[in-house]
Amino acid sequence: MTATELLRSVDPSPAARFVEVAGLRLEMTQAGAGRPILFLHPGIGLRDAEPFITRLAGLGRVLAPAHPGFHRSDLPAGMATVDDIAYVYLDLLQSLDEPAVVIGSSLGGWIALETAVKSTHNIAALVLVDSVGVRFAERDGADFADIYALPRAEIDRRLYHDPGRGRLDYPQMPQSELEILARNREAEARFCWSPYLHSPRLAARLHRIGVPAAVIWGESDGLAPPAYGRQLAARLPRATFETIPAAGHFPHIEQPDALAASIAGFLEGQGFASQKGQAR
Amino acid sequence: MRVFHFTEQPYPDAWTPDQPSLRVTTPNALCDPQVAADLYARYQDEWMLADELGFDIMVNEHHSTATCLSASCTITLAILARITKRARLLALGVPLANRRDPLRVAEELSMIDVMSRGRLEMGFVKGVPYEVAVANTSPVDMMDRLWEAHDFIIKAMTTVDGPFSWEGDHFHYRAANVWPRPWQQPHPPVWITASSPGSARAVAERGHVMATFLSGYATRAVFDVYRDVYRKTWNRPAPADRFAYLALCAVATTESEALRRAEKVAGYLRTIGAVAEAFRNPPGYASVADNVRALANFGKPRLGLTLSSGRVVYAATASCEELIEAGLMFAGTPDQVLRQITRFSDAMGGIGNLLLMCQGGDLGHDDTVDSLTLFGREVLPGLRAAVGGEEKRAMA
C-alpha cells in the first residue's frame, strides 16, 4: 500500500494506524520499505504532508508518527516539554532493525535535535528542515517571529512562500479534521509557548551530535529566517546547509519534489544507496 | 441582598478611535502619570462614598490595558482596607492561573483581611485570554493551575502549626507559613467566576460563591446547575448568598438623565472587544470542543443576546434600552432600577450579591457620585426589604 492510499483510506479499523511506543498509543503513517526514515512533523501536524511522504517512500521505509497530543496520539499526564517527547522517540528508534534517518520539520527538527543530543546510537543521519529549538539571540532579541502575537494573515505570510497555501475553509472541513486542527494547535502551544520555540540548554549540547546532518531551509521562511538555519548548521559538528527556493517555513508542503531530491542527494553523498529507486 | 460598587478604574483618555487594540499592545506613552494619579484618587473617593452609603466594594485587575488602571487587586484593596469603615472588600479577582506565586497571593490576601479586620471576600479567576501573553504563563491547563493554586492558598491560610511543603504539578514550596494568618476563620469567603455548567459544578461542589458577569437572562441555567449540584453535595438548598451577578448601572432623578449616564458607563462594553486579533483566543485557553465549534462557525456572526422579543443584539453595539431588556444593565430612576433588579433577581431564583459597575467608561466624578448617592438612598433600602434582608452566610 502506498502512502497515498494509507492517508486517503477511510479507516475501517483505526487501530491499524496506531502503534504503541513505551506504553503510548501514537497515530502513525507508514509507507515504503527498506532503511527506516523517521519523519517528525511540525506544529501544524501532518496536514498537507502526503505528497512529501509519498516521495520519501522512494528512499526507504517512512514512519511518520503524530507526536504525543497531536492528531489522535495519546497525551499522557505530565508530558509537558520537547524533552519528554524526545524520550518517546529514543524508544521508537531503539525498536527499529537498523539506525534510522531522522527528518524533522520545524518543531519536528527541535524534537530531532533534542533526541540526538541524548543519543545518536540509532540515528544514521539527521535532516533538519526549517528547524527551531536552539537559542542564538541576545536575551532581549528574538530568533523567531512570535506566531502567538501575530494576526492570522501575517502568520500565513511568514510561514508560506505562497500565503494562500495556509488558508483553510474551516466551516467546510469535517468535524474530525477540525478536532485534529484544534488539538494540534493546543499541543503545539503546550510544547512551544515558553521558552518560545527553544530549550535554553540545547545549544550547549549540540556538540554531541556526531552523525552527518543536512540543514535545509525554505528561502522565504519568515518565522525562522535562513540566517538562523546557517547559525544552526555552523553549530553542528557535521552539517551541510542548503536552501530551497519558493518555499517558506514548510518546504515539505510547498516544494516536496525539491526537498525530497535534496534529501536524496544528501543521503547519497553520505554513501547511503537509495533502496527503492530515486525520489521522483 | 448585598450590592457591591465596582469600577475597573478606566483611563478613558487613551480610548481614541485610532487605537486598534486597547489591550496588550497599547503603548503606555498614552498614559499620563499625573492623570492616572488623579483617577486613582477619584475612584478611591467614590469607593469611600459607597462605603458610607451602605454599598460593599468590588475591585479587579487587568494588565497592559487602558481599560483598567488596576494592575493588582491587592494594592487597591490594601488602601481600601484602611480608608473604608464597613464595606465588604471583594477582590474579583486574583487571576490565579496567571500568577506564578500563590504563596504571595495568600500572604497579601491575609494582610488585607487583617488590616480590614475581617472584611475580605477572596475572589479567584482563571485570567482573561489576552493576558496570558502578558503573564507569559502557559495557555494550556489553566483550570488545573487555578484549582491547584486555590487548594494551596486554602491550605496555606488554614495551616497554623508552622511550615508545610507542597510539591504539586504546577507549584512547589519548601516552607509555606503565612504571616499574618487571616482574621476570618478558617479563611475569608471564596468566590469563583463561572459561565458554563462545567465550571458551575466545580464551584458548587466546593460550596463557594459563584459569580457570573454580564450573562443576562441566560444566567439562570448556570445558577440552576449550581443549585442542583449544591443540594446533592451539601444536602441543603443553596442559599441566595452563594450567587453573584455583575451588571452595569446608572441612576438619576429622570430617566433621560439616567440613560445619558448609562451610555457613558456602557463605554466599558463598547471597548471591551478592542483586542488585537492574535491575543483573543490563545491556543489551549478554550477546550478543543469549544474551538471546534468556533472553527465550524468561522466568519459567522458571534453569539449575541436574545431579547424577549426574539431579536438578537450584541453587547458592544446594543442600545442602553436593549442592555436593560437583556439584563446586562440596570438604569433609570430609583424606582425603575429597583423594579429592574427585583425582576431580574426573581427570574434568576434569587441573587444574594449584586455587583454593579456604577462607574464605567468616561462617566465623570459628579455623575458617579450622584448615581451612587441616589442608589444608596433610594434603591438599596428597597432591595434589602424586597429580597428579605441579608441572608445568613452559608457555612461552606
Image: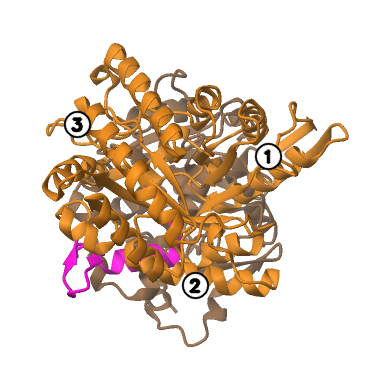
Chain colours: A brown, B orange
Q: Residues within 10 Å of mark 2 (few under 14, many from 20)?
A: some
Q: Which residue is mark 1?
A: B171
Which residue is drawn at the image coordinates 12% and 34% (left, top)? B17
Magenta-colored span: B285-314
Dots 3, 1 in contact, CB < 8 A: no
What SS does tag 3 mark?
loop
Q: Which residue is mark 2?
A: B224
Which residue is drawn at the image coordinates 66% and 52% (left, top)? A78
Q: Which residue is mark 3?
A: B15
- Whichever of callouts 3 and 1 sits on the residue coming sooner in the sequence is 3
Residue A202 or residue B243, whichever sits in front:
B243
Q: Position of residue B198 (x, y in %)?
A: 52, 66
Q: Quadrant of residue B359?
A: top left
Q: Mark yes or no: residue B180 visible.
A: yes
For the view shown, which residue lies furthest in the top direction?
B34
| Type of the residue with mark 2 | Asp
Q: Quadrant of residue A67?
A: bottom right
